[in-house]
Image (cartoon, helix red, strand yellow):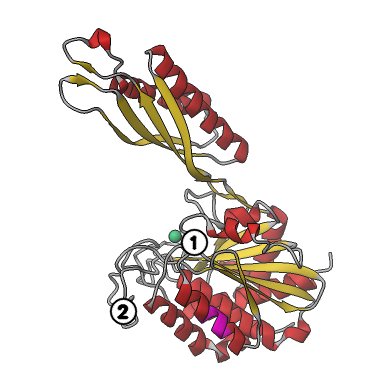
Amino acid sequence: MTEYMELVKEINEEIIENRRSLHRFPETGFQLDKTVEFVEKKLKEYGIESVRVGKAGLSATIGKSGKTVLLRADMDALPMKEETELPFASENEFCHSCGHDAHTAMLLGAARVLKETEENLEGTVKLMFQPAEELLAGAQDMIEAGVLHNPEVDAAIAMHIYVGNEISKTGTISYARGTALFSGDAIKIHVKGKNAHGSTPDKGIDAISIAAHIVIALQQIIAREVPTEDQAVVIVGKISGGDTVNTLAGNAELEVSVRATTEEKREYLKNRVKEISENVARTYKGEAKVEFWYGMGPLYNDPELTDQVAGYCGEIIGEENLTIIPIAVGTEDFTSVAAEVPGVMINLGVGSVDEGYSLSIHNPGMVLNEEALRIGSALYAHCAARYLSNKE
Ligand SMILES: [Zn+2]
Ligand SMILES: [Zn+2]
């Protein structure tokens, strides 16, 4: 068995240097010109030819024919100003506060050691460097451009940093078995009424009053339609409408957020939001148009693959450093990949509260322990190689 944990020690500085280079010049969404160029150049340096996939993705393969396992890293940053005061802090208005610089650097490190030991691989490792994770759009774009084909992907593994938590100790792994993340949907409800002077309410249709009834009616879904043992969220996060104090509002708009644990329950909630809104509006002589704005299904960690990958992680970091966690609220673009092929997303601890890392991802002050990066590289490489060598 190739000792990836030993091999990554020799390239530790390179992994950290790559991460810092990416960290200095964060880019967002699909606008990743410098980032993609950097990754392409590094892969080339390691003797790996990559191809551009979709709007701003990169893919490459290492190994020989056989099974194919995909390793995913995301490359995009967030539109916020960094507040870490690190010597390699962002030099523009964006910030790698979700750690995608670390993901990219870890996958580059894995690519390098996998390439160096390519003859030991018993199948193909496909690298997927994706854009626009934060927009929940980059993975789908790469899938539509064919990243899961040629060669056909049998399984996919993604890693995300975990920081600022009690259980995010450096170099440990936590993961959910089965559903890992709730679905998340944003819905807009456009309520149409009819303007009228406040002195003649009978001449108008009050969109604000209708919107208020919709808010109350939507609460009934959670109160009476979701079984007590199940979890779901329906909230009205924003409401607006009307023109002035003494006029019946002709229009109102609500923004609703819906979260569920399965695809069926997600569809149920979305349908009920639509039905209730339309019918309440009709009751009061108005009209509601429901717009499914954007959304992402629940992330499903294939249980069999999850057990396998957790076992491989345990082989190099020790069983005692693995924690199974319950389903979490949040969305992740890897969901699109895991909806197509068996997939698993694991969390790599890069600093716990006890270790002095108190801020979590999406905080502009988030810092991580770079000692974890080479461990991430070794885990990516080891999990891929072990998956390919498993002939069951
Ligand atoms: Zn994020
Ligand atoms: Zn992220």
Q: Residue drawn at (84%, 64%), measured in percent from left and top?
A: 392
- Comparing marks 2 and 1, which lies closer to the viewer? 1
The single residue placed furthest to the right in the displayed view is: 392
Task: Name the residue nearer the viewer: 331 or 145.
Answer: 145
Horizontal side of 243 relative to 118 (left or right) equals left
Task: Name the residue nearer the viewer: 38 or 301.
Answer: 38
Residue type highlighted by circle 2: Leu
- First in residue order: circle 2 vs circle 1: 2
Give the labeled residue for mark 1.
132
Q: Is residue 298 above or below residue 157?
A: above
Q: Which residues are magenta?
A: 38-42
Q: Secondary structure at mark 1?
A: loop
Residue 281 % position (x, y): 40, 19
Give the labeled residue for mark 2.
86
Residue type highlighted by circle 1: Ala
Q: Does any portion of residue 3 appear in the rendered image?
A: no
Q: Badge 1, how many Cα within 10 Å: few under 14, some, many 20+? A: many
Q: Is residue 38 above or below residue 338?
A: below
